[in-house]
Image: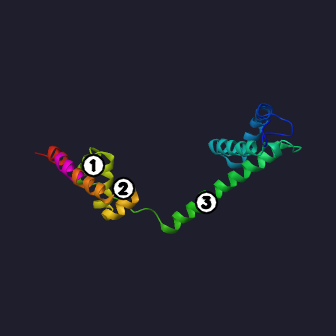
Amino acid sequence: MVAGMGGAGKTAEDAASEFDAFCAASSRRLLGQIYAMCGDMGDAQDCLQEAYLRAWQHWSLVSTYDDPASWVRQAASRLAVNRWHRARNSLRAWARHGPTPEVGEPSADSVLLARALQGLPVAQREAIVLHHLVGLSIEQIASRLESPAGTIKARLARGRTRLAEILSEEAPG
């Protein structure tokens, strides 16, 4: 027997079967109710799935309730309301700061550099971007990447060399 997986004396398999039957019997009705509440089928499915997960985690208690579906409905409803609050707060924050200013097209040089950076090994690219574009020192990069400073210096040197090669190959001629 597994503790926490159903009522007293139930095996994990019994609890799982009981929970599966509960889900099969209640999911269609609960999905319709949560959908009516939030107005988006995807959100309703996500909230209900999360509520069923929580019910399973506490099934030894939830299964003893007179109406376990009410517990799941309430959990899913709270999840839907929390999503709504987060979305509303995000919109309010966006409104406070105004729309994002328009960014012009990238220059040909920026596109060429981005393409060339993609030709570097990830470790070298990361070191170059952190040092030259973000402005971190070698020591800061070493700390962030949990690598010795000498390793970062070598990555920068090799990366710069390879970057120069790639850029000279791609330069309009």
The residue that label 3 is drawn on is: 88
Disc 3 residue type?
Answer: Arg
Under circle 2, the secondary element is: loop
The residue that label 2 is drawn on is: 147
Disc 1 residue type?
Answer: Leu
The residue that label 1 is drawn on is: 117
Return the x and y of residue 16 as percentages of the image width and height: 76, 33
Provide the residue span drawn in magenta: 159-165
Q: Main secondary structure of the magenta part?
A: helix
Q: How far separated are the C-alphas under marks 3 and 2?
A: 42 Å
Disc 2 residue type?
Answer: Ser
Q: Is residue 97 above or below residue 53?
A: below
Residue situated in front as seen by the camera: 162 or 72: 162
Pointer 3 with pointer 2, Cβ within 8 A: no
Q: Residues within 10 Å of mark 1 (few under 14, many from 20)?
A: many
Q: Residues within 10 Å of mark 3 (few under 14, many from 20)?
A: few
**Residue occupying the point 20% across, 47% down:** 162
Mark 3 vs mark 2, foreground winner is 2
**Residue occupying the point 72% across, 46% down:** 54
Q: Residue furthest right?
A: 66
Residue situated in front as seen by the camera: 81 or 69: 69
Q: How far separated are the C-alphas under marks 3 and 1?
A: 39 Å
Disc with the residue nearer the chain's start (1 vs 2): 1
Under circle 1, the secondary element is: helix
Disc with the residue nearer the chain's start (3 vs 2): 3
Under circle 3, the secondary element is: helix
